Image: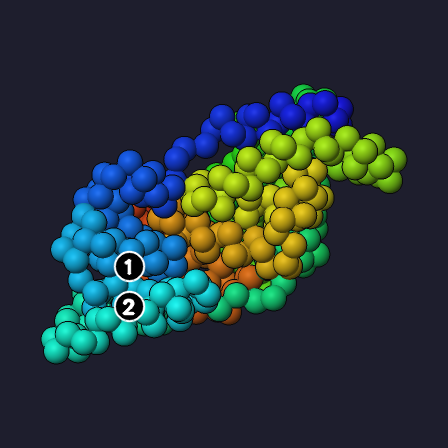
């Protein structure tokens, strides 16, 4: 891969990004559009988004976009603290010291806890992440009885383009059926070659089931000589990568989803640069969860599939169904179709 092409690839990635809900809520807050920001933070808080919960506490504390309510502020700060936000611990204690002087504090706290039941949200939605993240592709391939690798498109290889294809399919015998492309990056680049060979794959008996998902990564990063060249020139790309990192950290849900996919593919050029910032083995799952909690329907749908299969998270069918329903409610068509298919299978049995 010509290394100079990597910068073009990063520009392409940024050009396709839409502003995320959390980032939009923060911008609305900064621009003093408090009612809109309050509504957006509330919606995200109901998905267990820790940053949104904390910011909601700030708005209750100062009466921004809502009536001032110290009991509600404490409830939010305390919930953010329980979800691991260190800054929220001392804030919750300080607010409680003032709020508890109000004789109606307990009653007000009970009312807001019913309206925003953060403990229940954590119990019903938040997955338990495994330590190793997803790393699904190779383990899935190793189980196949017959595997043919897809051909890397010559045009993509010449331009140094890397990416992935996210598939869903049923395996009821040795072959895949009802194959759907859920998402791909870049679009119309790798799908055709993968679909051609997928028809020839033969599956093991342990791989049987409906609604299976696979994210197949395409990477050009090969050989020690290439690695040496890449690391010599990576400083040229680091500034652009830092912009990507900052946007994801600020709450851009689409970028969080893309970064999660890159981190799950170890051999991508971008993966190596991103891992200087997100170094933990399950960083891909952490970013995917953040994107789902940031109300990105593709991430919610993907998280539902992982919860159902136990890939990267502890298996939990109830949480899987909850995230699938949220994705469908957000208008994601594959989620809607999967719910209908599950209902039809249930009616037929």
**x and y percent of residue 168 in the render?**
48, 47
- Contact? badges 2 and 1 (CB < 8 Å): yes
Q: Quadrant of residue 161?
A: top right
61 left or right of 150? left
For label 2, the crowd category at 10 Å Cα-Cα, with few meaning under 14, some 14 to 19 and many 20 or more, is many
Q: Quadrant of residue 131?
A: bottom right
Label 2 sits on a secondary structure element that is: helix
Sooner in the amino-acid sequence: mark 2 or mark 1: 1
Please name the residue shown 70% across and 56% down the image. Answer: 142
Q: Is residue 317 visible?
A: no
Name the quarter where the C terminus is drawn.
bottom left
Q: Vertically, is 121 above or below 154?
A: below
Residue highlighted by disc 2: 95
Please name the residue shown 32% across and 54% down the image. Answer: 55
Please identify, in this view, whether the residue under mark 2 or under mark 1 is nearer the observer.
Answer: 2
For label 1, the crowd category at 10 Å Cα-Cα, with few meaning under 14, some 14 to 19 and many 20 or more, is many
**x and y percent of residue 344 in the render?**
30, 56
Depth check, front residue: 157 or 193: 157
Please name the residue shown 47% across and 29% down the image. Answer: 16
302 left or right of 75? right
Residue highlighted by disc 1: 57
**x and y percent of residue 67 in the render?**
14, 55
Q: Vertically, is 41 above or below 243?
A: below
Q: Is residue 23 visible?
A: yes
Depth check, front residue: 28 or 300: 28
Depth check, front residue: 254 or 33: 33
């Amino acid at each position: 891969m010509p290394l100079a092409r990597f910068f073009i690839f990063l520009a392409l990635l940024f050009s396709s990004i839409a502003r995320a809900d959390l980032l939009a809520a923060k911008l609305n807050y900064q621009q003093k559009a408090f009612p809109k920001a309050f509504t957006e933070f509330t919606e995200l808080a109901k998905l267990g988004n820790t940053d949104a919960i904390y910011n909601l506490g700030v708005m209750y504390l100062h009466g921004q976009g809502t009536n001032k309510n110290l009991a509600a502020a404490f409830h939010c700060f305390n919930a953010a603290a329980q979800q691991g936000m260190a800054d929220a611990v001392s804030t919750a204690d300080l607010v409680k010291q003032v709020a508890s002087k109000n004789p109606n504090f307990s009653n007000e706290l009970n009312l807001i806890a019913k309206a925003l039941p953060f403990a229940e949200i954590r119990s019903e939605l938040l997955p338990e992440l495994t330590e190793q993240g997803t790393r699904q592709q190779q383990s899935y391939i190793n189980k196949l009885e017959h595997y043919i690798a897809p051909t890397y498109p010559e045009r993509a290889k010449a331009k140094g383009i890397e990416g992935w294809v996210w598939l869903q399919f049923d395996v009821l015998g040795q072959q895949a059926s009802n194959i759907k492309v859920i998402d791909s990056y870049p679009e119309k680049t790798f799908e055709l070659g993968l679909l051609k060979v997928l028809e020839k794959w033969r599956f093991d008996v342990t791989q049987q089931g409906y609604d299976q998902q696979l994210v197949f990564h395409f990477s050009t990063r090969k050989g020690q000589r290439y690695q040496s060249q890449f690391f010599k020139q990576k400083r040229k790309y680091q500034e652009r990568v830092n912009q990507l990192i900052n946007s994801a950290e600020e709450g851009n849900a689409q970028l969080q989803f893309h970064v999660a996919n890159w981190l799950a593919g170890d051999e991508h050029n971008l993966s190596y640069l991103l891992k200087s910032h997100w170094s933990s083995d399950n960083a891909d799952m952490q970013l995917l969860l953040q994107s789902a909690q940031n109300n990105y329907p593709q991430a919610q749908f993907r998280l539902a599939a992982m919860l159902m299969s136990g890939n990267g998270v502890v298996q939990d069918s109830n949480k899987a169904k909850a995230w699938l329903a949220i994705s469908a409610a957000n208008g994601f068509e594959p989620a809607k179709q999967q719910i209908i298919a599950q209902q039809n299978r249930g009616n037929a049995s």
